Amino acid sequence: MLRIVEFKERTNDEGENFFALILEGSVEMVQSQNTGRYYATALRCSIPSTFTEETCKQLIGTSIPGKIVKVECEPYEFEIPETGEVISLAHR
C-alpha cells in the first residue's frame, strides 16, 4: 500500500507548471552496510498529476494500492538540486 504524503509544484520542458504527488511505501527494515545494524525506512517516489493544488492538499494521507520498486536501467546523470552535485544513477 502507498500513502500520499505531500506534493510539489514542478515545471515541464515547455515551462508549464504541474503538481507531482509524493508517495511513500510501507515501512521496511534495512541492514546498514557500514555498521550491520538494522534501521526502519520507507521508499519514496514522485508521480506527475493533473490535479489542482487544492485537490493535492485534500489527497494528503490517502492510501492507494501498489508498491515502490527500484528498476535497473541504463546509467544516467542526475544533478542534486540542493547541492548542484552531479551523480550517476542506474535505476529508476
Image (cartoon, rainbow, N blue to C red):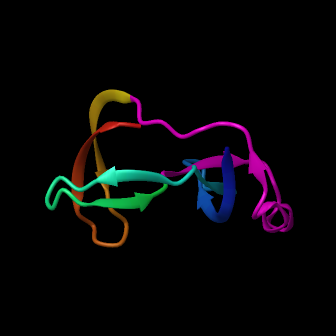
Q: Quadrant of the C terminus?
A: top left
| Residue 41 point in image, percent of width and height | 44, 58
Nearer-the-camera pick, 91 or 29: 29
Q: How many marks?
A: 0
Q: In what quadrant of the picture does the N terminus appear?
A: top right
At 48% from the left edge and 36% from the top edge, which residue is drawn? 69
Is 13 located above or below residue 52 in the figure?
Answer: above
Please identify the quarter of the rendering in which residue 80 is found.
bottom left
Q: Nearer the viewer, residue 12 or 34?
A: 34
Magenta-tinted stretch: 43-71
Q: Is residue 21 visible?
A: yes
Residue at the spot x=31%, y=57% of the render? Answer: 79
Q: In the shown orientation, is residue 78 left or right of residue 45? A: left
Whether residue 16 is visible here, answered yes or no, is no
Q: Residue at x 52, y 54 (%)?
A: 27
Residue 65 appears at what percent x and percent y? 72, 38
Q: Residue furthest front?
A: 37
Q: Is residue 69 left or right of 10 when viewed as pictured? A: left
Q: As drawn, which residue projects farthest toward the left? A: 34
Q: Position of residue 90 (x, y in %)?
A: 28, 35
